[in-house]
Every structure is written in structure tokens, then in C-alpha cells.
Image: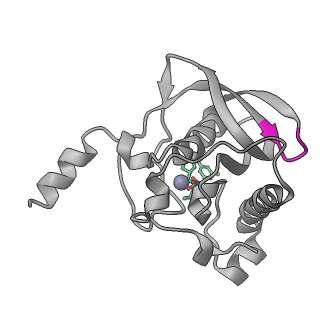
């Protein structure tokens, strides 16, 4: 099973690479990896398993975070209407988005980041995502709220983007705090 020691942390170059498209249908090996990623996010939300293996309760995980530079991620998250989104996706893509933006109150964190970074992370309020599921089905999802934010955070990982790259003034602030 995947545990925190398998998750690469900021500073690892794989987190800055553009992940490669998965050739469809995905191979057995690719499906096995994505299935294990989905299992990790589920396990990490199970209080007993999380305690036993010291897992941070995650709602999403992208392949680059376990050192695999391929376009796939897993999410296990419940929306504001109590609907569960529990799936692995290959080659996810935003096909349309709102102009309106939103952000998570209290900012974002990341399983690959072991420090608290404050600041609003602007995200599209609504997105339409296309992708292929673990059982080879092409799906189109219309998302909003927390689920839309998780999908955008995981998609960013596939493009080498960290959440703090999107915090306004974050880079300038770093320069001030750490002159030279
Ligand atoms: C997370 N969880 O899993 F708004 F019920 C984060 C961690 C880094 C804090 C574990 C999280 O934000 N949980 C959460 C948020 C809510 C309501 C709620 C639970 N990730 C996944 C990750 O790092 N993927 O790469 C970070 C999140 C930040 C915004 C969405 C994903
Ligand atoms: Zn992350």
C-alpha cells in the first residue's frame, strides 16, 4: 500500500515536470498504480487506518506525487450536497470553465508540502472535465465547489504547478522574507 514515505515532497523535480499522456487503453500496470492511489486516499480518510499508518487525510493524489510522471490522479471527496466523487482518472482535461473564480477559505495545503502556506489560491468556480475512468469509460463531469477545487489542484500537479504558485504576491513575499 502507498504510505506517506512514498509521497515525494516539494523540491523533487518530478513535481515540476509536465506529466505524459497515458496511452489508452491504460495498461494493467498503469491501472494498478491508479487503483493504489485511490486506495491511498480512501485509507487516509479511514480514522483507524490513518492512525495506524500515520497518513494525512487526503482528498486527492496525483501520480507525480508518487514519482510517476503520467497524467492520472485519484480523488475521494464529498461535495456540499453529500455526493461522493471517488474515482481515478486518466488524461483528465478541463474542457470549459466559468469566468467566475473561487477559493478555499483558509487556503490550500498539499500532501507534498510539509509546511503551512497562507493565502488565497484562485480557482475557477465551475469546470467541466473530461477523462477516462479505471474501467475505460470516457466521462464528462460538471463540477463546482470543493470538488472543482480538488480537480484543479490535482490537474495542476500534472502540469508541474504547485498551489502556492497561484497565491498572489507569494514569490515577492518570499524575497522579502529571505533577502538574497
Ligand atoms: C489534501 N486535504 O488532501 F475543504 F473535508 C488536503 C491535505 C493536504 C490537507 C491533506 C484537504 O484539503 N482536505 C479537506 C479540505 C476541505 C474539506 C475537507 C477536507 N490535498 C490533496 C493534495 O495535496 N493533492 O495533491 C490538498 C487539497 C487542497 C485543495 C484541494 C486538495
Ligand atoms: Zn497537492
Q: Quadrant of the C terminus?
A: bottom left
95 or 149, which lies in front? 95
Residue 133 belongs to magenta span: yes
Q: Position of residue 168 (x, y in %)?
A: 30, 38
Tally of numbered discs: 0
User: Is 30 drawn above or below residue 171 in the view shown?
Assistant: below
Examine the image and state in which quarter residue 30 appears.
Answer: bottom right
Q: Of all residues shown, which one is farthest toward the left?
A: 180
Q: Position of residue 14 (x, y in %)?
A: 49, 59
**Colouring mode (rainbow / by chain / secondary structure / one colour):** one colour
User: Residue 114 colored magenta?
Assistant: no
Q: Position of residue 142 (x, y in %)?
A: 72, 25
The answer to whether residue 55 is visible is: yes
Residue furthest to the top in view is: 99
Q: Which residue does the image show at 42% across and 63% down from the upper left?
A: 10
- The answer to whether residue 172 is left or right of residue 32 is left
Quadrant in the rendering for residue 23: top right
Of helix, strand and loop, which mostly describes the magenta segment? loop
Residue 44 or residue 71, whichever sits in front: 71
Q: Is residue 178 above or below residue 81?
A: below
Residue depicted at x 47% and y 48%: 160
Report the magenta residues as a range: 132-136
Q: Is residue 83 visible?
A: no
Q: Position of residue 120 (x, y in %)?
A: 39, 40
Amino acid at each position: 500500500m502507498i504510505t506517506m514515505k512514498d509521497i515525494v515532497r516539494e523540491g523533487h523535480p518530478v513535481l515540476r515536470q509536465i506529466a505524459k499522456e497515458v496511452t489508452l487503453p491504460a495498461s494493467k500496470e498503469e491501472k494498478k498504480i491508479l487503483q493504489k492511489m485511490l486506495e491511498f486516499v480512501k485509507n487516509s480518510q479511514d480514522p483507524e487506518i490513518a492512525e495506524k499508518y500515520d497518513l494525512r487525510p487526503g482528498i486527492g493524489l496525483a501520480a507525480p506525487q508518487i514519482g510517476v510522471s503520467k497524467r492520472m490522479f485519484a480523488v475521494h471527496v464529498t461535495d456540499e450536497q453529500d455526493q461522493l466523487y471517488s474515482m481515478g482518472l486518466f488524461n483528465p482535461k478541463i474542457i470549459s470553465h466559468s469566468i467566475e473564480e473561487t477559493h478555499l477559505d483558509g487556503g490550500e495545503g498539499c500532501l507534498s508540502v510539509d509546511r503551512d502556506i497562507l493565502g488565497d489560491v484562485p480557482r475557477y468556480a465551475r469546470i467541466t472535465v473530461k477523462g477516462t475512468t479505471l474501467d475505460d469509460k470516457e466521462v464528462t463531469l460538471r463540477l463546482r465547489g470543493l470538488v472543482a477545487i480538488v480537480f484543479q489542484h490535482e490537474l495542476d500537479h500534472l502540469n508541474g504547478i504547485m498551489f502556492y504558485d497561484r497565491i498572489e504576491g507569494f514569490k515577492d513575499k518570499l524575497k522579502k522574507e529571505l533577502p538574497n
